[in-house]
Image (spheres, grey):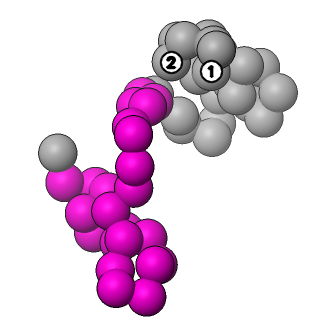
C-alpha cells in the first residue's frame, strides 16, 4: 500500500500540481448518514 506522500506525489505527477492536493489521510471508515451517503461536512472537520 502506498504511503500518503507517495499518493500526493503521484496525483501531482499525473494531474498536475494545480490540483492542489496537499494532504491525504487514510481512515478505517467514512462518516455516513442513515441512508449511507457520505457526510461531507464531517469529512472537513478534524
Q: Is residue 33 left or right of residue 38?
A: left
Residue positioned most to the left: 46
Q: Is residue 5 above or below residue 8?
A: above
Residue 21, x across and y down, in percent: 53, 34
Towards the viewer: 23 or 27: 27
**Most common SS among magenta residues:** loop
- Residue that numbered label 2 is attached to: 4
Towards the viewer: 31 or 9: 31
Residue 32, x across and y down, in percent: 36, 71
Towards the viewer: 16 or 37: 37
- Judged from the image, the secondary structure of the residue bearing numbered disc 1 is helix
Residue range of the region highlighted in magenta in the rendering: 23-45
Residue 36, x across and y down, in percent: 46, 78
Q: Residue at x 64, y 14 (%)?
A: 1
Q: Do callouts 2 and 1 mark residues in contact (Cβ within 8 Å)?
A: yes
Q: Is residue 1 above or below residue 14?
A: above
Q: Is residue 32 above or below residue 45?
A: below
Residue 7 marker: 1
Say whether residue 31 is magenta. Answer: yes
Give residue 18's quadrant in the image.
top right
Q: Residue at x 43, y 70 (%)?
A: 38
Residue positioned most to the right: 14
Amino acid at each position: 500500500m502506498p504511503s500518503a506522500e507517495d499518493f500526493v506525489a503521484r496525483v501531482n505527477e499525473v494531474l498536475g500540481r494545480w490540483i492542489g492536493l496537499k494532504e491525504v489521510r487514510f481512515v478505517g471508515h467514512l462518516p455516513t448518514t442513515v441512508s449511507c451517503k457520505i457526510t461531507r461536512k464531517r469529512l472537513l472537520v478534524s
